[in-house]
Amino acid sequence: MAARRPWLANRPAWWLIFLAQLAPLVYLAWAIPTHQLGYEPVVDSLRFLGDTALYLLLIGLAITPLQRLLPRAGLIDYRRMVGLYAFFYASLHVALWVVVDRQLDLAAIWEDVLEREHITFGAIAFLLLVPLAITSSRGWMRRLGRRWKMLHRLVYPATALVVLHYFLSVKFDTRTPIILAVVLLVLFLARPITRWLAEIRRRSD
């Protein structure tokens, strides 16, 4: 009997998920000219892009344990896409800060990186994400072999640094970054637990 196809292993599902991740950008393109972002559109846009990147990083980290729990879902096929979208929004976040907020003033940018803690951690996080985006293709997987997995484990410290960047940038209400830190911890613990559950299920089949 032929094996059943995973639930999401089809082109319409792929395009739906691909386009859904463009929705934040479409919203921002509408919100900026229509003055929907409040009194500080640059600051609000920076926060929105950073939040979107962080949420996508967490979704990407959730895919592997969810795939182990739901092997028929075919979620693993979307992990690279989600990761690249997270890097895309992180890049827009950084570009907006460099070009618009700091107006390409390299001295001011460097001073911020050195002296403002949340920017220091954010810059380190972005630098960690760059090699992950560059080496995300299957060609790089083949070239790096086992080292590819080791390299891409950097997504965990990178995401932790993004959460810390968020926490330090918030002046008053820190509930959201604290909740996201808990989510990240749960996802970190979920990897070995779901690996163990998947192994038990494999042995019982």
Image (cartoon, helix red, strand yellow):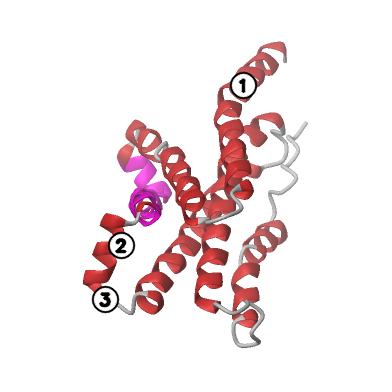
Sequence-earlier tag: 2 or 3: 3
In the image, is residue 70 part of the stretch drawn in magenta? Answer: no
Picture coordinates of residue 150 (x, y %)? 37, 33
> Dot 3 surroundings within 10 Å: few (below 14), some, or many (20 or more)?
few
The answer to whether marks 1 and 2 mark residues whose Cβ atoms lie closer than 8 Å is no
Q: Give, as a three-letter code, the residue at label 1.
A: Ile
Q: Is residue 100 above or below residue 81?
A: below
Name the residue rendered at 54%, 31% in the picture.
Answer: 188
> Dot 1 surroundings within 10 Å: few (below 14), some, or many (20 or more)?
some
Q: Is residue 165 visible?
A: yes
Identify which residue, 55 or 137, lies in the foreground: 55
From the image, tell me which residue sits under label 2. Answer: 112
Q: Is residue 53 above or below residue 197?
A: below
The answer to whether marks 2 and 3 mark residues whose Cβ atoms lie closer than 8 Å is no
Question: Which secondary structure, mark 2?
Answer: helix
Identify which residue, 174 or 82, lies in the foreground: 174
Q: Quadrant of residue 13?
A: bottom right
Picture coordinates of residue 128 (x, y %)? 35, 48
Name the residue rendered at 42%, 50% in the picture.
Answer: 136
For the N terminus, the quadrant is top right
The answer to whether marks 1 and 3 mark residues whose Cβ atoms lie closer than 8 Å is no
Sequence-earlier tag: 1 or 2: 2
Q: Nearer the viewer, mark 1 or mark 2?
A: 2
Question: Which secondary structure, mark 3?
Answer: loop
Identify which residue, 93 or 141, lies in the foreground: 93
Name the residue rendered at 71%, 49% in the picture.
Answer: 8
From the image, tell me which residue sits under label 1. Answer: 193
From the image, tell me which residue sits under label 3. Answer: 105
Q: Is residue 73 above or below residue 80?
A: above
Residue stretch rendered in magenta on the structure? 118-143
Q: Is residue 140 above or below residue 97?
A: above
